[in-house]
Amino acid sequence: MASRIPGLFLAASLGAAALAGAQAPPAPPPRDALESLATAPLPRAPSGDAHREIDRALAARDWARAETLLADAIAREPKSTALLKTLAGVFLVDRRPLNAAIALKKAEAIEPLDPQSRYQLVLAYVAMGRGDWARPELERLAAAQPSEARFPYWLGRLDYDAGQYASSVRRLEAAIALDPSFVRAFDNLGLCHEALNQPEVAIARYREAIRLNRLSAEPSPWPLLNLGILLRSRGEGAEAETLFREALAADPGFARAHYQLAAVLEDGNQLDAAVRSLEQAVKLDPAYAEPHYALARIHRRQGRMADAEAEIRIFQRLKAPPDKESGSVRK
């Protein structure tokens, strides 16, 4: 029954083909959007005895069952925007942003979206790499809620992804003026100032992001990673290593921090430790190509030529462009 869900939405008469990306190819989704999907509020079923089974599936975080039950309920109540919005919320936490966007657009065809649902639509679009679709929705939200820091923040993120760094700085500073504790806004300001070749300003922004981050109940590893990468590029490897280790303390499963830590260890000729860190990065993210290239480089230094060649083959396979006809990776 779960297989009905894609057909129910992808075949819906609401411009699903456009949502699938018939125009320009989408950009890679900003990691902020993926983090926001992972931390999205858990959806709740609409009230009523008929929806108790849905509520149980949601409480158990059984997203596949919840999606199936919600699809069945929508088939019985096709005009229920509450059910459609609940299903969109499930798709978001299940990291299926295209289906979430389609469900929300179906709801919008019945009645105007409330601000929270429109923001969920923004997150879905950004997670799909469709900043061009997210921007007008964000501008609409920002005009309606000028005191909300999330909206200039995301507009700044879209500007950054478009290479409009000065505009991004203005928007991110506007977000910070509304919320001086906005860690991600300071972190992304650091990225902007790096792109503008203003490393000292970038370092100050990263350090403020880290200061605020350390006060958070759930610190993010990203400000630590970003500052560490910049410091390593300036030859300040000792502090960079400390920052990468702190990032891993915040998130032991953060493959990029393992990769960057390995780079510092390799700089210090600690090759065995670097290999262990790279192997951990590969284990955590099998699609991450760069650790394989680094492993090949270290294996060559160690005289392990067969291992180096094997890692290069993996790197080339992971970096190969998709096959245009099948959508698969060329072998």
Image (cartoon, grey):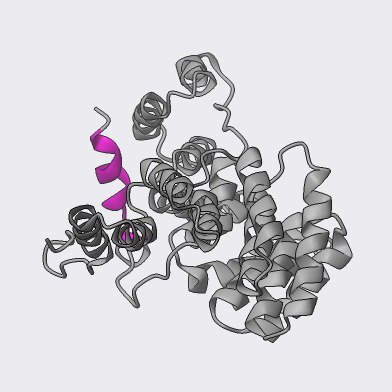
Which percent across, then down, holds residue 56? 50, 16
Rendered position, 251 above or below 238:
above
- Please indicate, yes or no, whether residue 141 appears anywhere in the rendered image: no
Locate the C terminus and report the quarter of the image it occupies.
bottom left
How many marks overall? 0
| Residue 140: quarter of image | bottom right
Q: Residue at x 33, y 52 (%)?
A: 287
Locate the N terminus and report the quarter of the image it occupies.
top left
Which residue appears farthest toward the front when viewing the image? 303
The magenta stretch spans residue 8: yes
Viewer-nearest residue: 303 or 47: 303
Q: Residue at x 52, y 13 (%)?
A: 49
Viewer-nearest residue: 26 or 100: 26
Left or right: 318 in relation to 169: left
Which percent across, then down, holds residue 190? 71, 70
The magenta stretch spans residue 277: no
Viewer-nearest residue: 71 or 95: 95
Which percent across, then down, holds residue 301? 34, 62
Left or right: 266 in relation to 323: right
Q: Residue at x 52, y 51 (%)?
A: 34
- Please indicate, yes or no, whether residue 92 appears anywhere in the rendered image: yes
| Residue 82: quarter of image | top right
Please report the bounds of the magenta region as a residue range. 3-16
